[in-house]
Image (cartoon, rainbow, N blue to C red):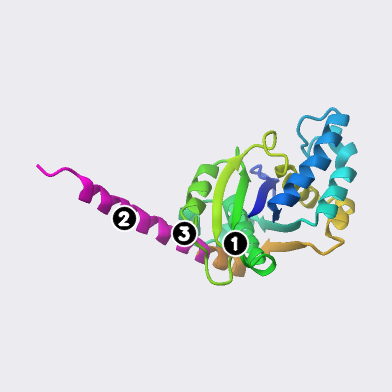
Amino acid sequence: MIEAYIDESSTHWDAPFLCVACYFGPHSRWRAFERQWQPILKEHEIKSFHAKNGKHDKVRPFLAKIIEDCKFKGVMASVSRSVYNQFASAQLRSGLGDPYAACVSQCVMKTCRLVKIYHPDKKVSFFIEAGQPKTERIEASFKSMIGRAFGAEFAPIAGVALVKKEDFTPLQTADFLSHVYGTQDMTCFNYLTRRRLIWLASIGPEILEDTSSGVKIMLAEQRWRRHLEKKQTKTSAPKE
């Protein structure tokens, strides 16, 4: 099983653009990551790493090194709010709603493509940081795809869950990547990309169109499942 962890940066309303990052890898590597990372957090008396917390800067080099050693692959999606407002389709807006959702969708779809390339026989489970507006809607949209793929070139989705950084340590890697990119901390970002294991996806008009296609598939799947559930309810209803 491949596990993918998604977190964001610059989601406040007045930020000109926002960033969503994803790191993915086999389950065994994530367990190795936790065995290395947890003692460092404990040594520095940090319960849960948050990249925006300046008091946690001292452990950034350790986190970057562990991410590199574990050879996690990353996906970085960002979008200008003005570009989103101009080019996002009505279906994308109604299906997911905002630039954050568009970035999450792009991360999910790109990750599924990469998993198909690097782990062709594997499915991927997504863990998305909880707390953002409409995350439950995003979760429900991707849950409709569990057991299915967006197409032949995508790995199937095995599961989707909303989680907190305090409870899921691997989520802190995506928090780190999204923050260093969003704040243009090029020292850390260049370190994280030096093995060329990060794929950037600045979301423009063409990407928004591609993301809209993925949302269209999810919405169709949701409608079909609701139809089946309604049909099953009628079938199982007791006759008078």
Mark 3 element type: helix
Residue 209 location (% of width, % of height):
55, 67
Tag 1 and tag 3, C-beta contact below 8 Å: no
Mark 1 element type: helix
Residue 194 location (% of width, % of height):
87, 61
Residue 52 sits in which quadrant?
A: top right
Q: Is residue 57 left or right of residue 142?
A: right
> Mark 3 highlights which residue?
218
Nearer to us of marks 2 and 3 is 2
> Mark 1 highlights which residue?
109
Residue in the image at 20% along x and 44% along y: 237
Tell me the quadrant of the picture where the N terminus can be found: bottom right
Q: Residue furthest bottom?
A: 152
Residue 177 location (% of width, % of height):
77, 50
Count the labels in the image. 3
Q: Is residue 47 left or right of residue 232?
A: right
Q: For the residue carrying disc 1, how many other residues have a C-alpha within 10 Å: few (<14), some (14-19), or many (20+)?
A: many
> Mark 2 highlights which residue?
228
Name which residue type carries label 1.
Met
Task: Specify start and end residues of the magenta stretch as a single range.
Answer: 213-240
Tag 2 and tag 3, C-beta contact below 8 Å: no
Tell me the quadrant of the picture where the C terminus can be found: top left
Separation of marks 2 and 1 at Cα, in angstroms: 26 Å
